[in-house]
Amino acid sequence: MRSMHDRHRRLLGVSLLIAFASFLFAACSTGPGSGGVLEGTEWILRSYADGDTLAIVPETQYADAEFDRSRVTGVSGCNSYNAVYRQGGRTLLISQPALTLMACDEESMALEQTFISNLQASRFYSVKRETLTIFAAKGATLLVFDAAPRNPLLGTWNVDSYADGNSAVSAPEDVRLEVVFGLASIGGFSGCNSFSGTYGTNGNYVRISRLASTQKACDETATAVETAFLEALQGTSFLDRRGDSMLLTDRKGSILVALSRPQPETAPSPSPSVEPSADATPAGTAAPKPTDTPAPSKTPPPTTAPTEAPSATPAPTPAPSVPPIIVPTVSTCDLLATDGTALGTLAYPAAWSTLSAPSDLACRYFDRDPITVPSDPATLKAAIMVATSSATYADVVAEATDASSWTVRQTVELEVDGLPATMVEGETKAVTGNLAAGTSRLAYIIDYGSAGTLTVFTVGSAGEDIYAANAAVLTLMVGASTFAAPTT
């Protein structure tokens, strides 16, 4: 018996040595990529190999990856996944993925199937600036990720409790509440209906637009929960992150919604544990039959009635997933003062337009449509605009909150990338500058010390969906941008 036991130990040792040697050989072998730091960043999928083409992730789909201590986790299009990874030099090997067992719409399931196959086929990688690229054994690009902006809300959350409208915080009983945050949009399930809208955050302040929901009729209890929950969610102002929990509070610090990261509701379904060979190519598996899960629009139409929600969640099978979240990619431009001083790098939705010339207008106007400079540049307007001033920060804030000119709805003091800032939202009482009476404006005023003041703002009409959407994107842009510290 001992001889057989020793033989088994020797065989195991030889197997481990072969595996280790294979990994060292892969790490030292020639191939694409240059390696880099994977950990500490949430990587959002931008494009993926689909056959012989590199497909861009549709705006209604989402997948991501986080690497930490030999495990890579994230959302794979529909389900959450968890896999083992090893890296050495520019080599990256990913194996043993386990997924939760939810079914989604056909497009999400197709993305998931291809995404997981590409992950398992990974052999090399590069991290350059804010981009992670994963390559196959023969050098083909499999996956391209962008680093997520500074946004602690991204992803799926369960609702642990909410302000019920009766000066109390209640835990939902026998009602499922779920919220999913994309880069600029919010969606989820509110106990009876699916909901959607837009939001923005700078990391400690959050602004949520009016939420649209489907029109399914439910029992009295579920309807009451839904009404109170959506009202609480729309009233949040600040974030208070505590580990895997997130508290959404009002301006006074009172809890409106308490969130926590979900745990898998069913046992994961791991794929075969044998690692693919070095020359493996992506291979898909059959996707589960999709359910009819509607996808929310980025900005809910103000007049069109929402589509009826899917039927009630069956039990005891897992609840259907939240509708896909619109996740735009982000572009950047460099903002310069009139004297050429660098003021920062502004982030904006990649699908939007901005100006690169002339220099005094570059990186100061952002819009969904192409921007044309009029004969008088002073009359140029866009969805989101940037203004610089040599006036002191205190003077600009005082002007924006002057009670003789503005009806101020809210003022919040905060920090933007380490600089003092104030968020001011108000409505003009009379003609103010080039703004007509009754114009609403949301502005982030940033202190550049002796260099002056920077203001990023949007204007419109209170209550209109386009103003709410622009305000949410503005907050997102401010939170995702970087600003140069003023020199003394």
Image (tube, rainbow, N blue to C red):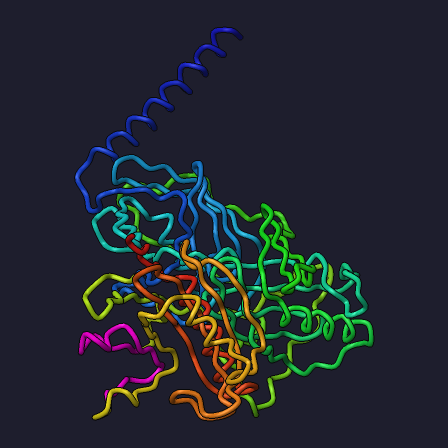
User: Residue 423, position in %: x, y?
Assistant: 49, 69
Q: Which residue does the image show at 55% across and 80% down from the upper left?
A: 403
Task: Indicate left or right for 385 with 202 as reference.
Answer: left
- The image shows residue 164, relative to residue 215, as above or below, that is above
Magenta region, residue range? 353-373
Assess whether residue 366 is covered by the magenta stretch.
yes
User: Residue 93, position in %: x, y?
Assistant: 34, 41
The part of the image, by quadrant, that contains residue 371 is: bottom left
User: Residue 246, position in %: x, y?
Assistant: 61, 54
The secondary structure making up most of the magenta span is loop
The part of the image, by quadrant, that contains residue 149 is: bottom left
Task: Indicate left or right for 172 with 32 as reference.
Answer: right
- The image shows residue 24, relative to residue 35, as above or below, that is above
Instruction: Decide if residue 35 is in sight here.
Output: yes
Q: Which residue does the image show at 44% across and 83% down from the upper left?
A: 459
User: Residue 474, position in %: x, y?
Assistant: 43, 72
Residue that extends furthest to the top in the rendered view of this protein: 2
Instruction: Decide if residue 271 is in sight here.
Output: no
Assess whether residue 476 is covered by the magenta stretch.
no
Q: Looking at the image, how many numbered discs can be counted on the residues? A: 0
